[in-house]
Each structure stands twice: as C-alpha cells, then as structure tokens.
Image (cartoon, rainbow, N blue to C red):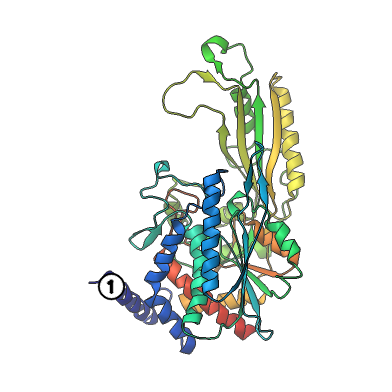
C-alpha cells in the first residue's frame, strides 16, 4: 500500500476507535467547521511533516558562538518569516544588534519576528511565542541518526529541534494555514513573536518586548507558549509555572599553562583539586543544596497546593522507565513532583580546561572552570541567590588555604514564573484538550526555565499560558530528541480547536 494512503487509513481508523470509547474518546464527535479542520489536518499531515523536516535540516544552534552557525540562525529566521508571509501575515523581522561574548568576540543576533494576522476588534487577539534555535547536536555524541535529518521510526520523528521548539511552532502555523486553506475566517486575531536565541538566554528579547509593550502588544489579550512537555507519554497537560535558573561559572587558576604531574605533582595547590572541592560542597547525595540560606525564600507549601500534586495522573514506574534511570531520589509521586516543580535544585554541568580525551595524559591543568546552575522557584530572587553562592564558595575556598586564584560569576539569572489558572485561556485550552483528546489535562508546572513567560508577565501584564504538545519521553536537549507524529498532528488540531474555544469565550 502507498505509505500516504496507509497513514490516511490509519488516521480514519484511529478516529473511529476513539469514537467507540478509546482511552481518550471525545465526549462527542467534532461537528461542522471543527470536523472540516480536523479532516484537513489528517489528510495533509505528510505535508506538515515534510515542512518540519525542512526546518530541522537547518543547524540553528545558538549555543556555540560560531559565525557559520549564526548564518544558519539567520537562514532559519528568514525561512519562518517567508512561511508566515505566505499565510498572509504582515511580518517584521526586527534587527537585534550584536552579542558581545566574554572572549571579546562579537556576533550578530538573529532578528526577532513580529507577525500578525487579523485586527478585528470584535475578536480576541492571541499571541504565540516560539523559538527556532536549538541546542548543539553531533552524530558522534550518540545519535542513532543524523540529528539534522528528520527521521521517522515507528511514528517517532527524530531530529534536533523536533520538539524543542520547531515542531510546536509549526503546529501553530499548521492550525492557522488550515483555516486559510479551507477559506474560513480565523476565529481569533493571531500574532507571532518568534526568536532565535532562547537556548542562549533570549538575548535582546526582553528589551524588544518592553519597547513594543504599547505598540505590537497593545492589542494582545492572551499569550500562548508551547515550549515544554506533558508529564506522561499519552495524557495532555496544561502548564501554569516554571522554575527559574541561575547559571554559574567558578574559575580556579594557578597559571595559564598546564603542568607535568611528574615534575610538579605533590608541590602545588592543584586547580582541579580546588575546583572539585568547591563543586563537591554545593549539594549532598540526597539532592539537598548545601548553600546557607538558599531555601529561605522558597514559598511555603499550602494544603491547597499539596492537593494539586495528589490529583496529578503520574505512573511512577512508567515515568522511571521512560526516563531510563534505575531509581529517583524520592519514592512517592508527590515528593517527586514537588522536587521537580516547587523546590530548587542544583546541577553540576561540566569542567572546562580539564583533560577529557581518550587515553592517559599526565597533565595538571593550570586553570579550570566549573559550571553549575540552580533552578529557582517562587519566591527566590536571582540577585539574592548570586550573593549566597559567592559567599559560600569564597568561604569554602578560604578554608583550603590555596595559593590559587578563585573567581565566581553568574552567567545567567532567570526568574521563576507562575500563572493564574482561572484565566479564560486556561478554560478554553481545557475545553480544546477535551475535544481533541477526550480527557481533562493534568495541571502541571515545569521544572525547566522558559524566560519569556516571566518577561511577558512582568513587562506587559498579559495572561500567559503554556500549552505543551510533546510527550515526556521526547528527550529535548538529548541525543534522542523527537516528537511523535501523533503529538505533532493532534497538536495542530488542538491549536485549531483552541482558536474556536477562545472565540466562544470572548
């Protein structure tokens, strides 16, 4: 059978099974316009996957400060701008200037896209935020396929950026393009803000948002972000909070050149030994952060909040298996969710300047840099955390009586975010999820950091919602990043249904 016809038949069969009472059977089949929209998306899903393949093929890595990767970022933003123009949107690619790097290098920042479709004052205006930059990826890092060639295996679409965040951005575009293709009026006014530096700290974004507060954003009623994951593999979720992130570097230096351990071993304060001691002082084996005062600002746990965790549908065994770890630090659902969402965590990421190649090299590094970060929660503040970290490391270092030089700096400081789940768009999203998936969503927070949510909330005081599409096992940032075809296509339907529900509520 032709693969396309096979997928169409499978899609129709799946719809029939859902209507007969499957795991996520809708309470009633979609009717009228919604039915036409769903059918169109099903019939054109291969085209939508092909576009995702073209976007994944662009190596839009914003993390590595390399000129050729910046060129790829500019190409990615141009590709997206052209796609939006084809929908009939007015598009402004805003020049973002240059990025000054610590080594003195200067690189251009890719433009931020501001686009809009429709300005009917009788309709609500929904603004979608997404990003098109990705984390670094190399085949030799452990990928089974080329990370920049979207590869479908058993309904899973593998590729860097598939779920973070090119797939969700395209799902929103797919929803808009479906109304256009059917020559149906869009139920809401649509705006887009799309950037290319999210993985590098959203350089230049906050400044633009503040500048456009009374222009581009003046007519916006709601802001939707789809840049995180469900809590499970099959049940949809709505996200109402994220952790912040304070990212640190701690440098220990003896001299610029390395030493030979046979010539100098035993008579030096070795920078690596100092650094290991510093990093080892940050967190204990149970995950408890050892920095004095770090928990003082954490919001107290209320009984109402505790009940929210009990209501979450999480199979711990499935979650552990999908994560491919032997065991977690905690044994109950509630403890795990609280330590992912409402308590801070500290992670050690790596050491720069150390010998990390195969073989046995008897070198003593003359200078090393450790990198670690703390995920922040309400009501922690980045400036307070920065002060606490520096005081702690300076105290530990002073006790070692080392002749080396030590310096600590905070490279990123991003605040946590929490939303009001009683806002209209949360209600509309719940209804849309019920229509498409036939179930109520899990109401969750996200343990990662999505800076733009807090920026929107603080800068323009608009209702912000996170509406994720990806499954928990999508592996964002990993060597097996993917988005399921089912999530991508049903997610496109979800956004379309959301437009209609928002129009009803408004």
Viewer-closest of 43 and 26: 43
Q: Position of residue 151 (x, y in %)?
A: 36, 57
Residue 181 x %, y %: 46, 81
Q: Is residue 198 above or below residue 222?
A: above
Q: Is residue 131 above or below residue 396?
A: below
**Residue at position x 73%, y 30% in the image:** 394
> 253 left or right of 75?
right
With respect to residue 382, does 235 lie above or below? below
Q: Which residue is mark 1?
A: 6
Residue 257 seen in render:
yes
Outermost residue toward the bottom?
32
- Asked if residue 133 can be seen in this view, the reply is no
Q: Looking at this view, name the residue that lies furthest to the left.
A: 1
| Residue at the image position 44 percent from the left and 85 percent from the top | 36
Q: Residues within 10 Å of mark 1 (few under 14, many from 20)?
A: few
x then y, percent, for residue 98? 67, 49
Q: Judge by depth and name the residue closer to the eye, 31 or 298.
A: 31
Is residue 375 depicted above or below 500 in this figure?
above
- The image quadrant of residue 338 is bottom right
Q: Quadrant of residue 89?
A: bottom right
For label 1, the SS is: helix
């Amino acid at each position: 059978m032709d693969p396309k016809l096979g997928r169409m038949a499978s899609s129709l069969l799946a719809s029939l099974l859902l209507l007969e009472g499957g795991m996520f059977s809708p309470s009633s089949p979609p009717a009228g316009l919604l039915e036409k929209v769903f059918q169109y998306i099903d019939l054109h899903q291969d085209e939508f996957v092909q576009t995702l393949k073209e976007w994944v093929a662009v190596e839009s890595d914003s993390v590595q400060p390399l000129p050729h990767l910046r060129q790829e970022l500019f190409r990615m933003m141009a590709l997206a701008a052209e796609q939006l123009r084809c929908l009939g949107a007015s598009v402004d690619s805003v020049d973002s200037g240059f990025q000054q790097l610590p080594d003195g290098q200067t690189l251009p920042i890719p433009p931020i896209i501001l686009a809009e479709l429709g300005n009917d004052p009788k309709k609500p205006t929904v603004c979608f935020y997404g990003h098109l930059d990705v984390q670094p990826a190399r085949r030799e890092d452990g990928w089974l396929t080329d990370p920049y060639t979207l590869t479908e295996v058993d309904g899973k679409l593998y590729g860097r950026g598939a779920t973070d965040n090119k797939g969700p951005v395209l799902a929103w575009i797919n929803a808009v393009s479906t109304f256009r293709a059917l020559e149906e009026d869009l139920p809401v006014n649509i705006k887009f803000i799309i950037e290319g530096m999210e993985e590098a700290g959203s350089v230049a974004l906050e400044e633009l948002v503040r500048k456009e507060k009374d222009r581009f954003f003046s007519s916006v009623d709601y802001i939707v972000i789809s840049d995180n994951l469900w809590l499970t593999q099959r049940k949809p979720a709505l996200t109402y909070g994220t952790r912040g992130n304070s990212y640190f570097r701690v440098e220990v230096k003896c001299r610029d050149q390395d030493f030979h351990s046979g010539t100098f071993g035993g008579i030096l304060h070795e920078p690596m030994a100092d650094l290991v001691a510093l990093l080892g002082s940050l967190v204990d084996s149970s995950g408890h952060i050892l920095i004095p005062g770090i928990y003082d600002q954490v919001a107290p746990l209320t009984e109402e909040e505790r009940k929210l965790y009990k209501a979450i549908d999480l199979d711990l065994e499935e979650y552990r298996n999908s994560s491919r770890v032997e065991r977690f630090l905690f044994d109950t659902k509630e403890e795990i969710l609280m330590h992912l969402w409402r308590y801070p965590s500290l992670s050690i990421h790596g050491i720069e300047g150390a010998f990390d190649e195969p073989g046995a090299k008897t070198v003593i590094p003359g200078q090393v840099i450790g990198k670690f970060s703390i995920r922040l929660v309400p009501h922690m503040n980045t400036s307070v955390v920065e002060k606490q970290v520096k005081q702690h490391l300076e105290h530990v270092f002073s006790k070692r009586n080392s002749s080396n030089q030590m310096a600590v700096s905070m490279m990123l400081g991003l605040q946590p975010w929490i939303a009001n789940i009683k806002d209209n768009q949360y209600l509309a999203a719940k209804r849309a999820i019920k229509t498409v998936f036939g179930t109520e969503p899990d109401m969750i927070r996200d343990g990662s950091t999505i800076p733009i949510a807090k920026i929107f909330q603080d800068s323009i005081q608009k209702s912000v919602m996170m509406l994720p599409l990806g499954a928990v096992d999508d592996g964002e940032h990993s060597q097996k990043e993917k988005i399921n075809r089912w999530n991508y296509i049903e997610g496109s339907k979800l956004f379309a249904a959301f437009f209609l529900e928002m129009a009803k509520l408004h």
